[in-house]
């Protein structure tokens, strides 16, 4: 996967991969490469979302403690 990619760019690329695979125009070899790239992008996006969720939880807990 590319270095310094954003979540938004990864999602855009993942969407393009899905469209390409769903078109049925890719060869078997191309489909395998697309699937591999898509899997890496999906993992990257999942990790970014998990990190964002954890940050939100941390901030919320911090704010709740401050209000007490």
Image (cartoon, rainbow, N blue to C red):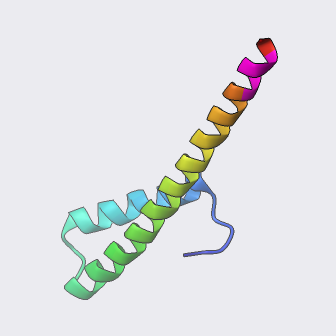
The residue furthest top is: 68
Q: Is the N terminus in the top left, top right, bottom left or bottom right quadrant?
A: bottom right
| Total count of labels | 0
Q: Outermost residue, bottom direction?
A: 29
Left or right: residue 46 compared with residue 16: right
Residue 20 point in image, percent of width and height: 31, 67
Identity of the residue drawn at 22% across and 65% down: 23
Tell me residue 53's x, y (percent).
57, 40
Residue 28: image quadrant is bottom left
Residue at 63% across, 58% down: 6
Q: Residue at x 62, y 33 (%)?
A: 57
> Residue 39 appears at what percent x and percent y?
38, 68
Q: For the magenta stretch, what is the residue range? A: 62-66
Question: Looking at the image, which residue is at 35% across and 82% down?
Answer: 33
Q: Quadrant of residue 59?
A: top right
Q: Is residue 50 above or below residue 10?
A: above
Magenta highlight on residue 13: no
Of residues 65 and 37, which is closer to you in this image? 65
Left or right of 37, for residue 47? right
Q: Residue furthest right?
A: 66
Q: Which residue occupies the foreground of this view, 25 or 6?
A: 6
What percent of the width, then of the height, locates residue 52?
61, 44
Image height of 30 relative to 22, above or below:
below
Q: Quadrant of the C terminus?
A: top right
Q: Main secondary structure of the magenta part?
A: helix
């Amino acid at each position: 996967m590319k270095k310094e990619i954003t979540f938004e760019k990864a999602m855009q690329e993942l969407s393009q991969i899905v469209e390409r695979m769903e078109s049925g125009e890719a060869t078997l070899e191309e489909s395998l490469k697309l699937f591999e790239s898509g899997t890496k992008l999906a993992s990257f996006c999942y990790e970014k979302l998990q990190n964002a969720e954890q940050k939100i939880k941390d901030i919320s807990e911090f704010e709740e403690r401050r209000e007490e």
